Amino acid sequence: MNIAQIEESLRELVETPFDNAVFIYRLLEIYGAPKATVTKLRQANSADNKTSNEVVVKKKLVFRVSSNGKASSAVDDMAGDAKLLKNAPRFLIATDGVEFYAKDIKLDQSLDSSFDTLNDSFDFFLPLAGIERYQGVAENPADIKATARLAKLYDAILEVNPNWRDKEHVHELNQLMTRLLFCFFAEGTSIFGKGQFTNAVMKWSQDDGTDTSQVIGNIFKALSLAASARTSLPEYAKEFPYVMGLKISNRSQSRDYYALHAVLLNFAKINFSNLNTTNQSLAENCLVSDITFDQANLQLVKTYPSFSASGQPNTITFKVDP
């Protein structure tokens, strides 16, 4: 499953009444455990005459059904059980079907959620699918979720428009996703007003979405036009700053440029690796010519042509967070 499918499958799981004989096995399947492995685990628990009130998966998780209102206490008990910890679990999980509590031992982070809204925190268990969360998630919980939502939108658009998988349409779709990603980030910083992009789209688009593309298109146009060139645009679009068409002189660079440059570098440092994990095609489209991503060393690499006798290209690198 991709990240969008993980979130959707988890939502479907928690919308059904909690079943202690099904839940943890289905959770493992959603996060990529092979069905054969899950079946073997079920059979092993059955052979040992164990109930599904506790399930141990070595190096993965320990799950326990708690008493009513005692999910967090159950996790605390597991965290203090040396015998259980010998299985080296990444996660300790407990639920009574109403409350849900989990602990990521590696990152020393906890999740306190209601059972029926667990899908809102789907990213917490991404390590089970081999996708590590970066350490900054606790400080910026919206970053990974915003990227995941865009990945879900990307998949949904392709599902409705299967003929858009050709090279030309994929490039256009990636360009749209890149612009949306910038707008969502910009409205959370001083580049846009707080929530300015989202509020404009919600307010000025019809409920059925028939004119949403026109509204977004007008905003994109405004971002690339100076105020004097916006006379034909609606008022809501004119309120957006001029950023995407920012002109930079070779002789002098304004304070606005340096501020924008710093913000975008910081965003790339924190988010690029995660974006590459959730949607590699979109991440690659964010890179201009001659810039590549060295995933093994977690760095962006800019390559310049060589004019030396050795013929070796010149490169500079920019480290990103895991």
Image (cartoon, rainbow, N blue to C red):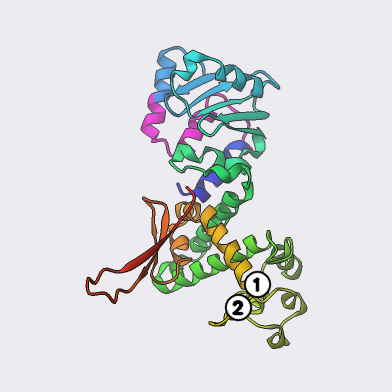
Q: Nearer the viewer, mark 2 or mark 1?
A: 1
**Mark 1 element type:** helix
Q: Position of residue 6 (x, y in %)?
A: 51, 45
- Report how far apart the C-alphas of labels 2 and 1 lie in the structure: 9 Å
Specify the amino acid type for callout 2: Leu
Quarter where residue 240 is shown: bottom right
Please state if 185 lies on the left or on the right of 91 as rendered.
right
Residue at 36 percent across and 65 percent down: it is 315
**Mark 2 element type:** loop
Please state if 228 lies on the left or on the right of 111 as rendered.
right
Residue at 29 percent across and 77 percent down: it is 307
Q: Position of residue 111 (x, y in %)?
A: 62, 34
Asked if residue 68 can be seen in this view, the reply is yes
Q: Which labelled disc corresponds to residue 58?
A: none
Residue stretch in magenta: 15-40
Q: What residue is pinned by disc 1?
A: 256
Q: Is residue 88 above or below residue 177?
A: above
Q: Is residue 56 above or below residue 126?
A: above
Q: What residue is pinned by disc 2?
A: 246
Residue contact between numbered discs 2 and 1, judged by CB atoms under 8 Å: yes
Nearer the observer, 39 or 277 = 277
Specify the amino acid type for callout 1: Asp
